[in-house]
Image: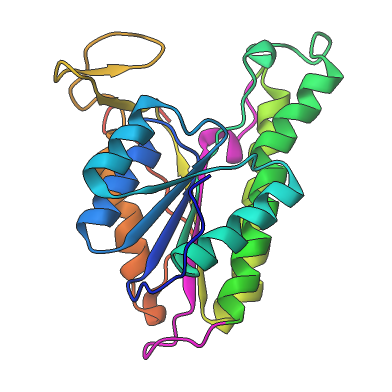
């Protein structure tokens, strides 16, 4: 956790939950370039990508277990104290547990199923609850905007695939949460956006190539580019409230759907 200090920041604050080298890192870089004060929260803040973001883009990195209520509450309190109340919050946690991958309904371990739901959906609730509390307590800007909460999701939010029941439950739950929050909070000045990504994510490696973390194959634009996903998130945050987007589905041009 970064050391607490008095908050004298006048810039808008973006808080990204999830500290991977794909979407989270791309969002952190872009948001910082756009002049926002950026914070990233992850269980392990010793990751090289987070160390790089801290040194090159002045990103504040915080340790947080997003599936633990007290950890999330402490995170939002600390960020508000050290940087400021976030105006943009991105929940970017996949939540899948490797042991549940490709497990049918008769094979799935109940404890791991619960862990998957906690990682993906319950953490989304905890993060969104704290974000909403802080945003509702602030005055809206001149455009009536109190803040933006964006949920990254997967195609499993729209359809349950075979041998993927646990992940489908987590994704559907997150989608339902986003929809409920949108109906509740958008009339109060908080923009809620739900972004299912129907694709694998590829990102630029140290040697300049773009590879998928599992497939390992070079890619061009066949996999979703996290830099372009980040640009979509920034656009969502900047939208005027007369045309707020609730849901946008992102997929590469060649994805079968």
At 35% from the left and 26% from the top, the residue drawn is 48
Q: Can residue 192 be seen in this view?
A: no
In x, y percent, where is residue 163?
Answer: 68, 15
Q: Residue at the left extreme?
A: 208
Q: Nearer the viewer, residue 26 or 68?
A: 68
Q: Can residue 218 be seen in this view?
A: yes
At 64% from the left and 43% from the top, the residue drawn is 66
In x, y percent, where is residue 186?
Answer: 55, 76
Which quadrant of the figure has residue 47? top left
Q: How is the image coloured?
A: rainbow
Decide: is 208 above or below 179.
Answer: above
Decide: is 93 above or below 103.
Answer: below
In x, y percent, where is residue 99?
Answer: 68, 11
At 39% from the left and 74% from the top, the residue drawn is 8
In x, y percent, where is residue 146?
Answer: 49, 79
Q: Which of 119 and 61 is in front in this view?
A: 61
Decide: is 208 above or below 198.
Answer: above
Magenta-colored stretch includes residue 66: no
Judge left or right: residue 82 versus residue 72.
Answer: left
User: Magenta part of the protein: which range?
Assistant: 138-161
């Amino acid at each position: 956790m970064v050391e607490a200090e008095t908050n004298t920041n006048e810039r808008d604050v973006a808080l990204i939950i999830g500290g991977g080298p794909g979407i989270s890192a791309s969002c952190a870089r872009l948001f910082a370039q756009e002049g926002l004060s950026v914070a990233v929260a992850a269980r392990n803040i010793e990751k090289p990508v987070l160390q790089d973001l801290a040194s090159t883009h002045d990103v504040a990195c915080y340790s947080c277990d997003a599936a633990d209520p007290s950890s999330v509450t402490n995170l939002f309190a600390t960020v508000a104290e050290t940087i400021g109340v976030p105006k943009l919050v991105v929940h970017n946690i996949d939540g899948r547990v490797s042991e549940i991958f490709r497990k049918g309904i008769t094979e799935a371990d109940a404890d791991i199923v619960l862990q998957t739901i906690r990682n993906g959906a319950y953490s989304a609730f905890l993060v969104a609850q704290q974000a909403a509390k802080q945003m509702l307590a602030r005055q809206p800007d001149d455009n009536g905007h109190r803040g933006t909460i964006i949920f990254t999701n997967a195609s499993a939010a729209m359809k349950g695939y075979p041998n993927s029941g646990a992940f489908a439950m987590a994704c559907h739950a997150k989608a339902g949460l986003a929809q409920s929050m949108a109906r509740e909070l958008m009339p109060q000045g908080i923009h809620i956006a739900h972004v299912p990504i129907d694709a694998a994510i590829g990102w630029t490696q140290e040697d300049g190539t773009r590879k998928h973390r599992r497939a390992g194959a070079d890619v061009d634009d066949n996999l979703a580019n996290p830099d372009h996903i980040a640009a979509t998130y920034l656009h969502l945050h900047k939208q005027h409230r007369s045309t707020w987007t609730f849901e946008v589905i992102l997929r590469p041009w060649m994805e079968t759907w």
